[in-house]
């Protein structure tokens, strides 16, 4: 026997690696479940119980025999999924209860309930969670995750070629990735460095630069300072034109980054999936260190 496919890494539903066998069932295939199992069930539950029998058949066939954990994928010809299959499809787009609670809580603009941070003892004001050095450090993991999601999506853009971590000649630095072709934002080839900034990171812009600006413009000016820092670091040193990508932990984009994403929206297939995956990744990361 052979199963249909095996996946390792983030797309694996069980642990780091697992394998799948796909069955498409006629919605009116004869029920194989015994009548007593269906006793007292309402119609929808009855149908699920009937489908789960086909799932059990698959488990009986493969489980314990495959080299890696086995997952049956069952879809009816009409597109109805078994509970397991629904979980497999939903994994990348589903938030846990804690993540949903966090996402709702942050919209109230209230900090966690404790006036003092229970990790560092500092004042637990709005945004402290993003900056506290004693919380679980997900910064590198978050950066790598968003980068990986971007790289994977950009690789699917037609007439485009992508290299990760190109060297900045004569230095020990590398940018995150370089793209040539349709997905390049500047000319035929350009390279990118991604930074995710806490929305409440301290303003580095001088007060006079912010004079008279309304709140939103002030915020953009503050973020653009981080962009200038990136330009100072890389521009004129990279082999190909440099583009800084700056996203706040809450998903706000600098003007440059917004233009870059607009360009990618035109060339990346399933761009909506990309933007959703990034949004959910950002929420998950912040939920991981938020203290209610
Ligand atoms: Zn703290």
Image (spheres, rainbow, N blue to C red):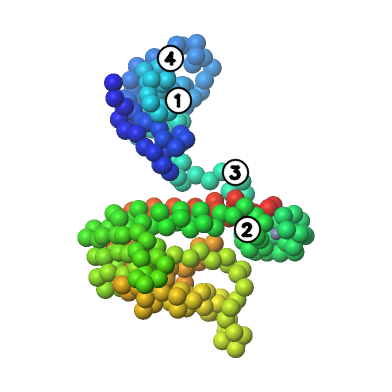
Relative image position of residue 111 (x, y in whole percent): 69, 60
- Residue at screen point 40% across, 32% down: 18
Residue position for label 3: 97
Residue at mark 1: 48
Q: Secondary structure at mark 3?
A: helix
Q: CA distance from mark 2 to mark 4?
A: 47 Å
Mark 1: give few (<14), some (14-19) or many (20+) Cα within 10 Å.
some
Q: State the CA–CA distance, disc 2 to disc 3.
A: 14 Å
C-beta proximity under 8 Å, tags 2 and 1 = no
Q: Residue at x 62, y 52 (%)?
A: 136
Q: Quadrant of residue 168?
A: bottom left
Residue 29 against residue 130 in the figure, above or below? above
- Picture disc at residue 33: 4
Residue 43 image position (x, y, % from top left): 47, 24
Distance (Cα) linking label 2 and label 1? 37 Å
Quadrant of the rendered image containing residue 206: bottom right
Residue nearest the observer in this picture, 241 or 57: 241
State whether residue 113 appears in this view.
Answer: no
């Amino acid at each position: 026997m052979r199963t249909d496919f095996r996946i390792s890494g983030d797309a694996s539903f069980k642990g780091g690696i697992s394998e799948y066998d796909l069955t498409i069932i006629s919605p009116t295939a004869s029920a194989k479940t015994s009548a007593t199992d269906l006793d007292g069930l309402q119609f929808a539950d009855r149908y699920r119980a009937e489908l789960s029998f086909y799932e059990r058949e698959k488990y009986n066939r493969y489980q314990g025999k495959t080299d890696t954990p086995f997952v049956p994928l069952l879809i009816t010809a009409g597109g109805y999924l078994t509970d397991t299959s629904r979980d497999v499809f939903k994994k990348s787009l589903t938030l846990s209860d804690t993540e949903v609670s966090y996402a709702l809580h942050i919209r109230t603009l209230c900090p966690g309930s404790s006036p003092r941070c229970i990790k560092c003892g500092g004042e637990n004001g709005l945004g402290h969670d993003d900056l506290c050095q004693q919380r679980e450090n997900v910064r590198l993991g978050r950066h790598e995750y968003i980068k990986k999601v971007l790289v994977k999506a950009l690789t699917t853009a037609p007439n485009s070629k992508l290299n990760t971590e190109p060297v900045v000649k004569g230095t020990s630095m590398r940018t995150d990735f370089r793209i040539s072709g349709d997905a390049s934002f500047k000319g035929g080839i350009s390279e990118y460095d991604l930074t995710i900034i806490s929305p409440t990171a301290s303003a580095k812009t001088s007060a006079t630069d912010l004079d008279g600006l309304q709140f939103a413009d002030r915020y953009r000016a503050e973020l653009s300072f981080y962009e200038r820092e990136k330009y100072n670091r890389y521009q004129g040193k990279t082999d190909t034109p440099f583009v800084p990508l700056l996203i706040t932990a809450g998903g706000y984009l600098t003007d440059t980054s917004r233009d870059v994403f607009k360009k990618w929206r035109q060339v990346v297939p399933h761009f909506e999936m990309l933007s959703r995956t990034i949004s959910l990744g950002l929420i998950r990361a912040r939920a991981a260190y938020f203290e209610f």
